[in-house]
Image (spheres, rainbow, N blue to C red):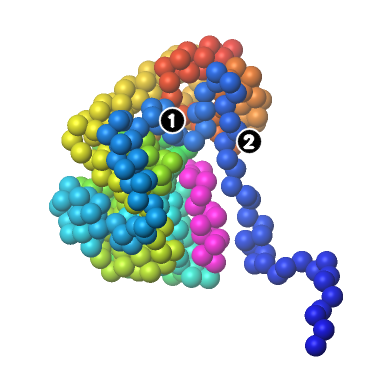
Amino acid sequence: MTAPEPTNAQVRLRPEIAALPPYRQGRPAPANGFKLSSNENPWPPVPAVERAIAAAAAEVNRYPDATALVLREKLAERYGVTADEVLVGAGSVSLLAQFVLAAAAPGDEVVYSWRSFEAYPGLVTVAGARSVQVPNRADHGHDLEAMAAAVTDRTRVIIVCSPNNPTGVAVTRDEFERFMASVPADRLVLLDEAYAEFVRDEASVVGSDLIGRYPNLVVLRTFSKAYGLAGVRVGYAIGPVEILDAARATAIPLGVTAVATAGALAALESDAEAELLGRVDQLAHRRDDLRDALIAQGWAIPEAQGNFVWLPTGERTTEVAERLFDVGIVARAFPGDGIRVSVGEPESVDVLLTVLKELV
Ligand SMILES: Cc1ncc(COP(=O)(O)O)c(C=O)c1O
């Protein structure tokens, strides 16, 4: 039999996947500029974390422990749960994908607030499910009542992002408890708390306080932001064992590397953690000062509980983002909507305030 002639026919891909926008890596910062586009921690790792990562790097000829048991045990002890109630993933975005895949099939719905974390729509589409986006309130926070009202027979997952990326507004404990009471207990609620350590408003929901209270709640945390480990990819989920087991089944095996778990474990040691949380405190203060200064300039900045602030620039978004770039600041622009600026080095704040004053 002769081989078929090659043709120009296009490979058949799932059309909804082929239509997904490709991941947009933030533009690199210009020389002497500031990369404030990915909500990263501006500090390099503390020495103990760097040493642990280097030691783990010396053994990368070996596969990692598939279940990251030592890290799960450490986190379990901290949160007063069993190691089986903790799932570690290659960043919390991997975990989000795993939970959506575990619960939502083609034809099912996933409800979340919008605008929120850019990754949600793609993860839902990849699962074959349908996104139901509930507009944020006028104050840029989640409209949890409308989200609960958007739940249908087809809803399988509801994602609550607190503080919300990119707007910065946190959900309050009272709002969240009312929401949980109004959502059927057989629908999975993912509380995405990627920025939990930066929250200073005491009325905000704290997922770890709610563990064990709801059979359908999973709390997601990450080492990427407060712990400065975005580059090695490690995050975790806490929740009921059977939900975590289902999510484990959807993971690509061995995604969490030994380098990542070594970094995370070192970051949880008391001296390293105290230093890291001290940095978080500095960033939270810098964020509050930045927000106050921008409000004094006349900007309508929403409540900011993450390591970033939201500039609701609307139709002027592209123009303002270009002006920021001209002075060396790379921020994340959402054309037609607003600009998210991560809180970075102190010098970046001065540059920001100078340029934004002219653009109010
Ligand atoms: C709301 C939210 N969730 C999850 C993530 C994912 O973080 P990672 O995968 O680095 O843990 C991010 C990162 O930007 C985020 O903003």
Counting from the top left corner in percent of width and height, residue 259 is at: 36, 47
Task: State the extent of the magenta-drawn residues as a range.
Answer: 114-138
Q: Residue at x 61, y 26 (%)?
A: 321
In the picture, the disc for residue 308 is 1
Sequence-wise, the earlier of marks 2 and 1 is 1
Q: What's the amino acid at mark 1?
A: Phe
Ligand 1's image quarter is top left
Q: Which circle marks residue 336 in the picture?
A: 2
Most extreme residue toward the bottom, as rendered?
1
Which quarter of the figure has residue 247? Answer: bottom left
**In the rendered image, which quarter contains the N terminus?**
bottom right
Q: Residue 178: x and y, percent?
A: 29, 51
Disc 2 marks which amino acid? Answer: Gly
From the image, state whether disc 2 or disc 1 is nearer to you: 1
Residue 251 lies within the magenta run: no
Q: Report whether residue 144 is seen.
A: no
Q: Measured from the top left, where is residue 103 in percent x and y?
A: 41, 67
In the rendered image, is residue 120 in sight? yes
Neighbours of disc 2 within 10 Å: few (<14), some (14-19), many (20+)? few
